[in-house]
């Protein structure tokens, strides 16, 4: 029997409700028949449902890292609750009879194999090709390269034209004054921002939308926080426009349109493929990532939910961010991510260009249980002096293109209450005030309700360091406490 954990089931589920419904089906005896292939690559179940006939569901593990789920029910969720119920039957070690692999599944496997073979044939080494195959491949490659290059040059020139529109918005807003823009003017700017979509500039377009949202909010409540936020967005927009113009002009001038290791591609709105990241040298093989924190927020400017996971590479202590974007118009088609309390064993991953906590992405992972030795490894990467790290942290946060926070692990002697609030005292005696970033859910007050007061002494904290404009100093928001055998999350 194939071993499976509930964490793996939750990771596969399209949403928590589907997993809960699948668990109920299993617990209530919804399956009237359970079978598996002799080689453990296929599990099947016959489940009673709301229809006249029982539903036939299966879990195909011919590709261990990417199982395929099939079900005869009308649900558009993948995997559906019946498939998840089948996994819960496996988790419960129910008895599965041995069966032959059905012909229809054999045919589907064969079709997939044909597709894989064609892909391998296309990637066939030149040394194995005949002379005729080499000539055909070269002609095909040259024609495709020329077409792709012309399309990229056309796109880059269009982006340059769009940056003129971005600069116009920036200069007019600065000349008019952010706090004096009226309703009619806002509508004009909204129309200009809408036009940016025609120039392949979704990145600057989102920033412009965010800027207008902050200005509108400031006009309604006169809250200085909105005005300060608008200034921050304007700074990033100006920096992005200036750097992007130089970047694009150099690429066109040097006839170098290929993707390169530069964060501006994504900031302008480009979408990386995993294979492209690997091509520019950002691939990572056989890594173990432990999730330290997780949260979901809503991006009003982009009209999307963002599921954010913070992960540590257990081999070198690097802290990465993983983002799952769910636009409102596509919510029912994109699975919401959830907290992962185990360790992800990942064969292939890639990081994105950038500074600070780099974004990481992967396809396919096995989730195992978090062990005490994993916690010990995580704790070993924590620093114990704020003063020695503060300058490097501030330099990254000063970059207008960087994220407004930097996540780090810090070993502390204690967390204590002061007149200003909670203060973290490190092993070396340095101190830093704990606070809550405007962009994140508040967590500092949760320190007061920790069930075990021992967590306040001699532990390691995952902190989001940020610059607090009000107090004009570096603060840290507590996200998780890492003990010798567990990760206690304050944000999840």
Image (cartoon, rainbow, N blue to C red):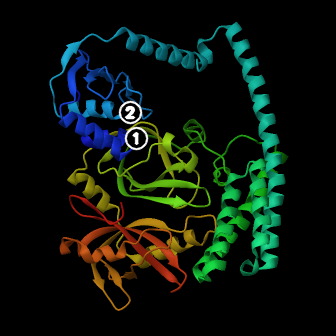
Q: Quarter of the image holding residue 205? A: bottom right
- Per the image, the residue denoted by label 1 is 14
Compared across the picture, whether 196 is left or right of 429 comes to: right
Q: Can residue 198 be seen in this view?
A: yes
Residue at image x 64%, y 72%?
A: 214
- Per the image, the residue denoted by label 2 is 79
Residue at image x 72%, y 22%?
A: 141
Measured from the top left, where is residue 460 in percent x and y? 30, 68
Residue at image x 41%, y 28%?
A: 74
Measured from the top left, where is residue 206 in percent x and y? 66, 58
Q: Quarter of the image holding residue 240? A: bottom right
The mark that comes first in sequence, 2 or 1, is 1
Compared across the picture, whether 364 is left or right of 191 comes to: left
User: Considering the image in quadrants, where does the N terminus appear?
Assistant: top left
Task: Please tell me which residue lies in front, 433 or 106.
Answer: 106
Measured from the top left, where is residue 308 in percent x and y? 45, 55
């Amino acid at each position: 029997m194939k071993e499976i954990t509930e964490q793996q089931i939750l990771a596969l589920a399209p949403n928590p409700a589907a997993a809960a419904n699948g668990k109920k089906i299993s617990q209530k005896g919804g399956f009237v028949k359970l079978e598996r292939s002799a080689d453990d690559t296929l599990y099947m179940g016959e489940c009673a449902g709301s229809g006249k006939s029982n539903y036939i569901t299966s879990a195909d593990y011919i590709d261990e890292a990417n199982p395929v789920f099939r079900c005869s029910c009308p649900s558009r969720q993948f995997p559906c609750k019946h498939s998840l119920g089948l996994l819960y039957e496996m988790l419960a070690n129910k008895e599965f009879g041995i069966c032959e692999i059905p012909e229809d599944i054999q045919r589907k496997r064969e079709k997939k194999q044909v597709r894989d073979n064609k892909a391998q044939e296309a990637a066939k080494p030149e040394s194995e090709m005949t002379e005729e195959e080499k000539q055909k491949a070269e002609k095909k490659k040259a024609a495709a390269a020329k077409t792709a290059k012309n399309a990229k040059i056309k796109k880059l020139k269009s982006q340059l034209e769009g940056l003129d529109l971005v600069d116009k918005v920036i200069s007019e807003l600065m000349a008019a004054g952010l706090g004096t823009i009226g309703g009619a003017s806002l509508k004009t700017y909204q129309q200009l921002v809408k036009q940016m979509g025609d120039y392949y500039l979704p990145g600057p377009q989102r920033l412009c939308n965010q800027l207008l949202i902050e200005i509108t909010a400031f006009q309604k409540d006169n809250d200085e926080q909105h005005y300060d936020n608008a200034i921050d967005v304007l700074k990033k927009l100006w920096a992005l426009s200036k750097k992007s113009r130089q970047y694009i002009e150099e690429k066109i001038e040097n006839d170098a349109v290929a993707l390169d290791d530069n964060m501006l591609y994504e900031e302008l709105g480009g979408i990386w493929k995993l294979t492209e990241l690997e091509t520019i040298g950002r691939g990572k093989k056989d890594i173990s990532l432990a999730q330290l924190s997780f949260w979901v927020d809503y991006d009003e400017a982009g009209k999307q939910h963002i599921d954010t996971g913070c992960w540590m590479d257990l081999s070198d202590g690097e802290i990465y961010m993983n983002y799952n974007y769910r636009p409102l118009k596509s919510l029912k088609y994109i699975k919401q991510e959830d907290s992962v309390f185990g360790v992800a064993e990942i064969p292939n991953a890639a990081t994105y260009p950038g500074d600070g906590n780099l974004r990481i992405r992967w396809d396919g992972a096995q989730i195992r249980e978090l062990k005490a030795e994993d916690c010990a490894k995580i704790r070993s990467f924590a620093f114990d002096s704020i003063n020695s790290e503060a300058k490097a942290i501030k330099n990254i946060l000063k970059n207008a293109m960087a994220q407004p926070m930097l996540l780090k692990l810090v070993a502390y002697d204690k967390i204590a209450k002061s007149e200003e609030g909670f203060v973290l005292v490190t092993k070396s005696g340095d101190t830093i005030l704990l606070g809550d970033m405007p962009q994140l859910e508040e967590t500092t007050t949760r320190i007061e309700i920790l069930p075990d007061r021992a967590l306040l002494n001699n532990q390691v904290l995952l902190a989001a360091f940020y610059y607090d404009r009000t107090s004009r100093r570096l603060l840290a928001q507590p996200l998780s406490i890492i003990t010798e055998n567990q990760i206690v999350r304050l944000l999840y």
